[in-house]
Amino acid sequence: MASLSPLLKQATPVIVERGEGVYLYDEDGRRFLDFTAGIGVTSTGHCHPRVVAAAQEQIGKLIHGQYTTVMHRPLLTLAERLGEVLPEPLDSVFFSNSGSEAVEAALRLARHATGRPNVVVFHGSFHGRTIGAASMTTSGTKFRAGFSPIMGGVAISPFPTAHRYGWDEATATEFALRELDYVLATVTAPAETAAFVIEPVLGEGGYVPANPAFMAGLRERADKHGILLVVDEVQTGWGRTGRFWGHEHFGVTPDVLVTAKGLASGFPLSAIAASSDLMAKAWPGSQGGTYGGNVVACAAALATLDVIADEKLVDNARDVGATLEAGLNKVAADTPAISDVRGLGLMLGNEFRTADGEPDAATAARAQQEAASRGLLLLTCGPFGNVVRMIPPLVVTEQQVDDALEIWSGVVADVAGS
């Protein structure tokens, strides 16, 4: 008899039987508030009726139409519809299955388009688990350890993580940009650097937002040296941060945008977008895949776009996210063990530290586990595992946030109260 790999570490003991909106139900019928959203995937909630209907209708007509063999209308329509939400001049799209695949496609495009071998990533980033994406990931050693040699050509520069440094944001930003210039002077020459690759908000790295000055500094240096700015919106896209794209908070436009997770409300689908001129610089035959742009996933993505627009879910993420953030800050104000609450929209993290300022993964883990036992599903993140993150579906209501905050407040008082 076979079983699942023991390397799959479960964040909660829940065996889920069904989902509805912001709730998951286990096999005994117990209801849980799901503030994980499948790690930011179920943007329209679990089993949104319009997404379910679109997928069911499509399954009855065509399940797989391999897109380098035949075309199908949902793929073509989705590409057209993305033009409504993508920043100008990003008007050309390539679809794949996962965030890692999309990051690898963006890397390949950047190297092809520039003829340069190297990329710069930023400390704390997460870009995936495949070899190229893992080589670009620095949010924790577990994602890249034990299978060296990893891919070469990756330089790492600081991210302006002000809280970690103990500085204000301006000081952290000045430092990070100065160190980027140092990297370009000592590690990867601008003429050999194809791209800067960055998350607008560090995901696995601890839910740390970038800021306008830092992103403007990247854009300025990219333009000066002919380097592409690649923005990894796998977790921050599709309304998660209270804007459709996370980079919109910072007033810059990327050359390449990477998206996945919330794109199809739970169906595997990812994409990269670039201008037609830039995309045309990739080598012929360099993009493809057996399952990329799956017809059922594309149908679900089209329904997801409709739901996000019709139900004003981007605005909901902004407004209900503000309520959640205010509630988390109120809990933190009474809890010395929580040293920081941060994030954007419905992408918020609570950082735990000990009395002497050290990362406190043990308390974060206890809080996350105790929350699950009380009906609130959460995840941890951060290089030290000391950040408890909250990423509910974008359909979450003020009442559901209040319910979650009531549970969270009790959990924190019991496991980390002073």
Image: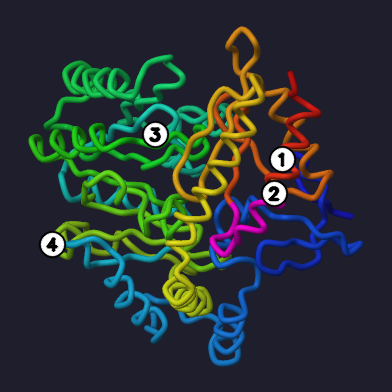
- Residue 157 point in image, percent of width and height: 32, 24
- Residue 95 point in image, percent of width and height: 38, 66
Residue ID for mark 2: 404
The extreme bottom residue here reads 61
Residue 145, by quadrant, is: top right
Q: Is residue 359 left or right of residue 173?
A: right
- Residue 13 point in image, percent of width and height: 82, 46
Numbered disc total: 4
Amino acid carrying label 3: it is: Met
Separation of residues labelled 4 and 3 (CA atoms): 28 Å
Separation of residues labelled 1 and 2 (CA atoms): 6 Å
Separation of residues labelled 4 and 2 (CA atoms): 47 Å
Separation of residues labelled 3 and 1 (CA atoms): 41 Å
* Label at residue 161: none
The disc, 1 or 4, on the residue closer to the chain's N-terminal end is: 4
- State yes or no: residue 402 in magenta: yes
Separation of residues labelled 2 and 3 (CA atoms): 42 Å
**In this orientation, which residue lies closer to the viewer: 172 or 321?**
321
Residue ID for mark 4: 277
The disc, 2 or 3, on the residue closer to the chain's N-terminal end is: 3
Camera-nearest label, 4 or 3: 4
Amino acid carrying label 4: it is: Asp
**In this orientation, which residue lies closer to the viewer: 145 or 92?**
92
Say which residue appears at 31% left-offset and 51% top-offset: 106
Q: Is residue 369 left or right of residue 211?
A: right
Say which residue appears at 46% left-offset and 28% top-offset: 149
**Local crowd size for mark 4, using a 10 Å CA cut-off: few (<14), some (14–19), many (≥20):** few
The disc, 3 or 1, on the residue closer to the chain's N-terminal end is: 3
Residue ID for mark 1: 408
- Residue 63 point in image, percent of width and height: 56, 82
